[in-house]
Amino acid sequence: RKGFLVRKHILDSGGRRTRKGRRSWRRVYCVLKDLSLAMHKDDSVAAVAAASPDAELRVHHSLAGPAPEYTKRRHVWRLRLASGAELLLQAASQADADAWVEAVNRA
Ligand code: I3P
């Protein structure tokens, strides 16, 4: 599964709160393949094919789900990694968010 999401880091590995200055929302192009979720900062999909990802998350033993307590943006889902890190990810629609959650949990 591939597509644009808007990402916010809320916890770093070990479950520590992501510090101020690193908590802003950023649009990333995401590619989920096997057990890896690659995130590219570049908006150009052509560039994405060539460039190495900005972040490559291992989604093994991760948990994706809804984020109902986060009400500032719509279609936001949560990704908890095995490391204890946690991200919020905003999709284009609720159907898109649901599809991402399912894809990550199936990986
Ligand atoms: C963060 C940025 C985020 C905001 C976050 C800020 O600042 O403004 O948009 O989250 O608030 O800390 P920075 O870019 O300096 O990291 P929201 O959009 O969810 O309000 P938070 O610390 O309450 O998460």
Image (cartoon, helix red, strand yellow):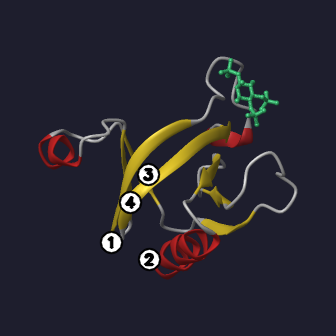
Residue type highlighted by circle 4: Gly
Residue type highlighted by circle 3: Leu
Q: Position of residue 27 (x, y in %)?
A: 47, 40
Alpha-carbon span between mark 3 and mark 1: 11 Å
Residue located at (48% from left, 67% from top): 60
Q: Which residue is mark 2?
A: 107
Q: Earlier in the sequence, mark 2 or mark 3?
A: 3
Residue located at (32% from left, 39% from top): 43
Q: Which residue is mark 1?
A: 34
Q: Earlier in the sequence, mark 4 or mark 2?
A: 4
Q: Are marks 2 and 1 in contact (CB under 8 Å)?
A: yes
Alpha-carbon span between mark 4 and mark 3: 15 Å
Give residue 3's mark.
Answer: 4
Residue located at (59% from left, 50% from top): 83
Residue 100 vs 77, above or below: the answer is below
* Secondary element at tag 4: strand
